[in-house]
């Protein structure tokens, strides 16, 4: 009688990854583009993440950074500042009053102003003691107009 021997060979799949390893660095433009692309209906973030090989958590993180203002295309730069001698009467934006002791009536108090020229050409003049959060909200609101 003839005997047949069955020989099984295990086949393994090997994936070869080429290119630079490690973390990928995304530019601000790429992050904003991916967040904009993921701004859609249900499942849009997962689809964009899958298409570009990015974790969905990164897209959500970049979205939060974009909303908070921590992520922007513009690089920080120096801004020219000039000090005005006399404050213009109609264009002063003053902060909300706080509990500050009033100076004696015989002492004249002058408030120094800061002038901010926005990217869209608008000029914002504010008191020097304005709260940074208030100034950030004003600039954000007026720069987008």
Image (spheres, grey):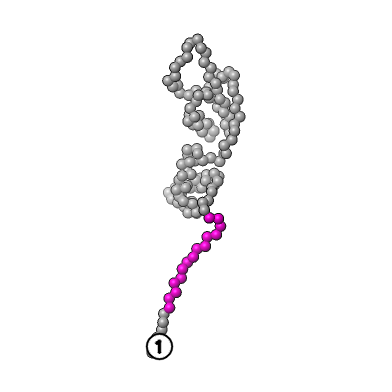
Q: Position of residue 38 (x, y in %)?
A: 48, 47
Seen from the viewer's position, the closer of residues 34 and 135 is 135
83 drawn magenta: no
Q: Residue furthest front?
A: 22
Q: Position of residue 110 (x, y in %)?
A: 53, 17
Q: Residue furthest bottom?
A: 1
The local secondary structure at tag 1 comes to loop
Rendered view: 49 above or below 81: below
Residue that appears at 51% across and 40% down = 71
- Left or right: residue 82 versus residue 38 is right
The residue singled out by tag 1 in the image is 2
Q: Position of residue 140 (x, y in %)?
A: 51, 33
Residue that appears at 50% across and 10% down = 106
Residue that appears at 48% across and 29% down = 134
Span highlighted in magenta in the image: 7-21
Q: Position of residue 47 (x, y in %)?
A: 47, 52
Image quadrant in which the N terminus is located: bottom left
- Left or right: residue 2 versus residue 76 is left
Image quadrant in which the C terminus is located: top right
Q: Please tell me how crowded label 1 is: few (under 14), some (14-19), or many (20+) other residues with Cα within 10 Å.
A: few
């Amino acid at each position: 009688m003839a005997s047949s021997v069955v020989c099984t060979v295990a086949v393994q799949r090997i994936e070869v990854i080429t290119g630079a390893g490690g973390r990928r660095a995304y530019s601000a433009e790429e992050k904003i583009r991916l967040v904009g692309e993921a701004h859609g209906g249900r499942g849009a973030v997962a689809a964009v993440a899958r298409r570009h090989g990015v974790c969905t958590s990164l897209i959500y993180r970049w979205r939060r950074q974009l909303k908070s203002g921590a992520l922007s295309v513009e690089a920080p730069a120096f801004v020219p500042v000039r000090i005005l001698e006399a404050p213009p009467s109609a264009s002063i934006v003053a902060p909300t009053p706080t509990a500050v002791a009033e100076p004696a009536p015989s002492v004249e108090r002058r408030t120094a102003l800061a002038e901010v020229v926005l990217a869209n050409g608008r000029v914002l003049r504010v008191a020097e003691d304005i709260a940074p959060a208030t100034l950030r909200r004003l600039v954000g609101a007026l720069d987008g107009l």
